[in-house]
Structure formats: structure tokens, C-alpha cells
Image (cartoon, rainbow, N blue to C red):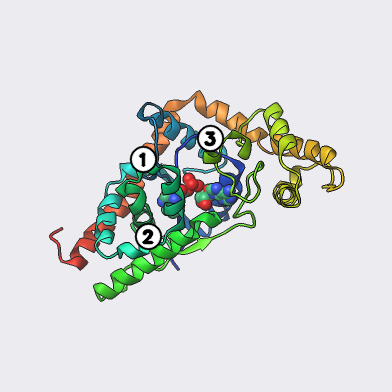
Amino acid sequence: MNKQTVVSGIQPSGQLHIGNYLGALKNWVEIQNSGKYDCLFFIADYHSITENYDPKEKKEQIFNLAVDCLAAGLDPRKSVFFIQSQVPACTELAWVFNTITPVSELERMTQFKDKASRQLKNINMGLFDYPVLQAADILIYKGVLVPVGEDQIQHVELTRDIARWFNHKYQTDYLPEAKPLLTKSARVMSLADPEKKMSKSLGAKHFLGIDESKEKILDKIKKAVSTAEGIENLKAIYESFLEDMAGDFKPDKMGETKAVMAAGIYNHFASFREKKQELLKNRSYVNKILAQGKKQAEKIATKTILEIKEIIGLAS
Ligand code: TYM
């Protein structure tokens, strides 16, 4: 029997935080290592340029994210790992999907509304069309399982709808229906404002970067709010790193608990830090992996776009 295809992506927009790690990356590595699936993971650089950014920094952000993913355990022998924009068939498919996606469906997307409200001077078409490109990311590889955090569920549901609209319009069953794959920590909350999702865009005190220094981690956890919701969030984080915790979670002794947590989280990433240092010294090795991933992804994507063009009546 053919293995099911798993597809997921992550944006290069600065530091990775424990929300990205617990909600997605850690899961990717486990799924990959299970050997049960065909896995494709990519750096969603085209998505990232829908937000305000500095072009001078982007290349380095992409490279660093590649290093982070590899250091966290993505293995090019087990997964196809590549950069989204290097496989143009994906953006071609997004165009095809644009022609079957109702504008009203995109207007419902909560991430669009949220991001648009944060960049009022840059509400560009790409930001609006973002979920259509995401659907193309998944369906160009015929992905059926999409490991993501909770904030991406709506986009994966739209991907399923787009597949249905496509199959219906063209009287085919060519595109599969994708489903999100969530972890227990699919929604890690901000340290400083636990009613909001942990995210870089909220500012430094809200998130915990996966390669921050011991001092910084302790400082950020110490300053994490200790309201009932804050404690609940810290407890969820504690439980996600349970194996690394050398002490109990004591809600009545948060000072002590926070010190245990900071040490545990820092230790969890010890081998990550080591691998990252090695990879940073070996840029050509990382670039070789990405070039190989591009080749592998392109092979699948080119076949799909040619078949799609045939189905929709264009010359291929
Ligand atoms: P991005 O780069 O914002 O986030 C990468 C992954 O991290 C998850 N995540 C979280 N999980 C739990 N708690 C949090 N606080 C938290 N913050 C982020 C996200 O859910 C995501 O899984 N649109 C995607 C990238 C993308 C993609 C795709 C994903 C582009 N094309 C195709 C899957 C399939 C995004 O912005 O992720």
C-alpha cells in the first residue's frame, strides 16, 4: 500500500519559538521518524513576504530556519526538505485555485483579519490570497495530513474545500482531501499575555525562542504572568517538556517552579544547540540538502501541474 503524504511548512520570519516547536516542528520530526508516511516539509518564504520585512535579512532568515529545522531533527534522508519559492509549479497551482475560490471565503479567514489589523498600511493581495497559496503548497504534493498548530486549522479546512470545489467543477476525483494533524500543544499561549497565542509579532517578552540563552529563558519565565490563565499556560508548557523537568509543578510555589522550568527547557535544547553550531559551520552542506530537496519536490510538483493543466483544459 502507498504511504499517506504529509506536507507542512513554516515561515522564515526570525527566531523560532516554543509554540512553533511544540505545535509543529517536534511533531514533524516524530512523524518523519515513524517511517509511516511520505513527508515533505518546506520553508514558506513566499508566504513570509506578505508581511512587512527587510529584503536584506530574508536570505539569512531562510538559511537560519533551514539550520534550525535540521538541528531539531529533520532528516533529509527521511523527508523532502526544501524552499517553497524554488518550486514554481506551486505558485502556478495557486493561480488555478484562485479561479475557483470565492472571495467571500477568503474574507472569512481569521488570520487575514488579524494580520491585516496589524499592518494597516500593507494590506496586500498576497496577504488576502495567502490561504490559496497554502492550499497549493499542500495539494501540489497531494498532501493528506498536515501537521500544524491550531491557528492553521481554518487554512487546512479551506484546502479541503478547494479540493472539493476543484473536483466538482472539473468532474474528477484528482485532488485528495487534506486534514490537520494537531499535537497536544497545538496552541501555546503568550508568556506575558496568556489570552493571546504565543507569537513573535507580539514582542520579545511574549515568546520563548528555542535557542535563547539560559539567562534569557529564566528571565522571561520569571516575568511570565502568574494569573490563573498564566499558570495554566505554564503548566501546559511544563507538561510538554515533562521529561526534562527535574522537579514538580507547584502552583503555590511559582518561583521554584519557574526555575525548574527554565532549566528543563534550556536542557531540552542542548543537543539542538550543538547540532546548530555544527551546521552553521557547514553552510555548503545545508545548501546541498536544500538543493536536493528542491529537485525531489520539483519532480512531484511538475507532474501534478501538468496533470492539472490537462484536467482544466490548458495546453501542457
Ligand atoms: P508559521 O510559520 O506561522 O508557524 C509554523 C507552525 O507553528 C505553529 N504555531 C504554533 N503552534 C502552537 N502554538 C503556537 N503559539 C504557535 N504559533 C505557531 C503554526 O500553527 C504552524 O504549524 N501558514 C503557515 C505556513 C504554511 C503552511 C503551508 C503550513 C505555509 N504553507 C502548508 C502547512 C501547510 C504559517 O504561517 O506557519
For disc 1, the marked residue is: 121
Circle 1 or circle 2, nearest the eye: 1
> Mark 2 falls on what kind of element?
helix
Instruction: Please state which of residues 46 and 109 is positioned toward the viewer in this rendering.
Output: 109
Q: Is residue 298 left or right of residue 197?
A: left
Q: Residue at x 37, y 60 (%)?
A: 107
**Of pointers 3 and 1, the one earlier in the residue sequence:** 3
- x, y percent for residue 203: 56, 36
From the image, tell me which residue sits under label 3: 15
Q: Amino acid at mark 3?
A: Gln
Q: Residues within 10 Å of mark 2 (few under 14, many from 20)?
A: few
**Crowding near pointer 3: few (<14 within 10 Å), some, many (20+)?**
some
Q: Residues within 10 Å of mark 1 (few under 14, many from 20)?
A: few
Task: Measure the alpha-carbon separation of dots 3 and 1.
Answer: 24 Å
Q: Describe the element under mark 1 as helix, strand or loop.
A: helix
Measure how far apart labels 3 and 2 are at the Cα level. Answer: 29 Å
Q: Is 38 situated left or right of 129 in this image?
A: right
Q: Give the residue displayed 75% in from the left and 48% down from the top.
A: 227
Q: Decide if ligand 1 comes within 8 Å of the CB at mark 3.
A: no
272 to the left or right of 111? right
